Image (cartoon, grey):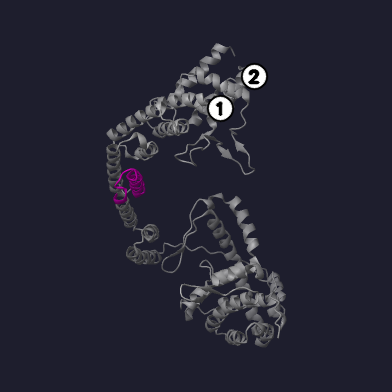
Amino acid sequence: MQINKFNELIEEIERSSFSVKYDFEIANLFNNLIEKYPTNFTPEQIQQLKWEFLLFRLMTKNSFAADGLRTDRFVPMATYNNGAIFPDPNSFSDEALVYFEKRAKDSKNPILTTRYLDFLWEKSKSKKKHIFAIEAIEQYLLTVDAYDNEDVVFEKLDGLQRATELCLILEGKSKKKPLTEKLVIRLNEQINVTNEKKNFRWFLEMFELVIALKQFYTEKQIKEFIKLCEESARQYHKDQNFHLQRSFLELKSKLGKLLRSSDAIKNDVDEQIGLSLIAEAEAKSGSGLVKAHFLQEAVEHYRKLGNKKKVEELITQIKEATGQAIKNKEFKHFSSTVELKKEDAESMKKSLGTGKDVPQNMGTPPNFFPNWNHAIKLTEDLSKKYVVSHLFPIVHYGEKYPVGKPQTSEEIHEDQVMQNFKISAQLAIHWLTKFLSELIEEKKVNIEDFKDFFALLKEIDNDTYETVLEGLDSYFDDDHFRATTILAPQLEDILRKLLAVFGGQTTKANTTAFEEKTLGTVLSELKPAISEPIYYYISWVMKDYRGLNLRNNVAHGFFKKRQGSPFYSTALLHIFCLLIANTKVSVKK
């Protein structure tokens, strides 16, 4: 294509770009030329259009919404499962950079020019590349008025944010700051326009820039901005947009730090944020679960403030809200049926054996043993298959109130693994309970077979052994409530004594003397000796709120007569068998 005609097409894209809303639309304009005239361009022109397409397909970031002052401006639009990225900001050739430099000089559109200059500032190897940054700042200030589309406030703000970032890099340590002074004038104009239109939302980004450029603002101006934050917070509270209300309250606190009276402002903001969370809970009171969520957020807020009285008051309200959720059946129950072929069931039952082989086989993995490592692998497979599962937070509820909420990425992953482990553990215990009860009913195993196997406990502690036998008697007498309430605390004691046998310390110093370590600490210190899979199984049965949590429920009286079931006592019996079968203890007389 003749150069004049080619330049006319590029100029048309420049004119069209004033009206677009997103950068990828500019990329599409260049790509559309290739598709419309597939045979009319020279190979060089095709290459130039491809460079333009890839450049405007890159995503942009800035330090005010990302990772600090040296945030990469240009990042890939997409990252694929195999690790590939598109576009790759580091894949542009030296020839492409030369082309972008020419375009930066020729372009009459500041929206496009900033892209060329900023990319050259970030990727050029020139010793004078700071000139690209200086010119980019000038162009970013022009983009504030460049867009024809009034809906692109975010793009305008991004330009101001990026200009601020570049000013701080270039002039941060300089006494004279001519570029920053131009930026501040432009920013103040936008603050005034936003105030006239009462478009409060965009003050959030603008006042963040004010804080970054605080040396250019007087105390009087800061106080005016604080008043605007207060007005914005009142408006969003009135609109019941409590999230934005709290955002403006937090921004008010940040601005307040620039004043001498910052403590008073902070204290006022802290109280207003707490009241906002409570107000949102009340506004969402149609759902007990949603109300409990915001009340829980308020609890965390007041706990950080050290307001114990308010925390206790809110906990009472959380219990009431959770009770409302239960009463209104807001919790959805999902169930599934697992079918086992008769021959498979017989094979599983046969693996238990008969007589004295039964407790030994119960203690031999992988018989009826839910393996934590398998749950990890299953979680990895499911996370790839069901990507949406990563999008929603999880809160675990007890009978009366929330009991757990994973926060960090490590906690969330561990929680996902625990959900899959839970399914495996429940199935294993159900099958073991069924087959063991059948063997007892068929008189193919009896208490004497277990007493012989449990004799190792004598070597650890004879009193504990005799107490465990009481639990065994109850189990074989079909009194599973009594069996559970005996075996659960005795299992904790055996674990503590095993820690001592392996050379660990079971007590710790407190402020006055000594006290016994908790079960969680004992288990953690035993982990190397009993193996990770057994550790997680014991944790799930004894202390995890997502599991059976028997230690807590029995010790605190939450385990009631109606809950007496062979499911719980069999799980405890199973763990005793695992510990005995996999622990070798020699006692020196």
x, y (%) of residue 431?
63, 73
Report the side of 18 relative to 455 (left or right): left
Tell me which segment is drawn in magenta.
241-264
Q: Is residue 259 magenta?
A: yes
Most extreme residue toward the front is: 175
The C terminus, quarter of image = bottom right
Q: Secondary structure at mark 2?
A: helix
Q: Which mark is residue 53?
A: 1
Q: Position of residue 454 (x, y in %)?
A: 66, 83
Note whether 210 is above or below 561 in the view shown. Answer: above
Q: Residue at x 45, y 67 (%)?
A: 398
Left or right, 548 with respect to 195, comes to: right
Q: Amino acid at mark 2?
A: Pro
Disc 2 packing (10 Å; few <14; some 14–19; many ≥20): few
The spot of residue 574 in percent (x, y) is 63, 76
Question: Is label 1 in a helix, a strand or a loop?
Answer: helix
**Observer-nearest of 434 and 140:** 140
Q: Is residue 249 shown left or right of residue 368?
A: left
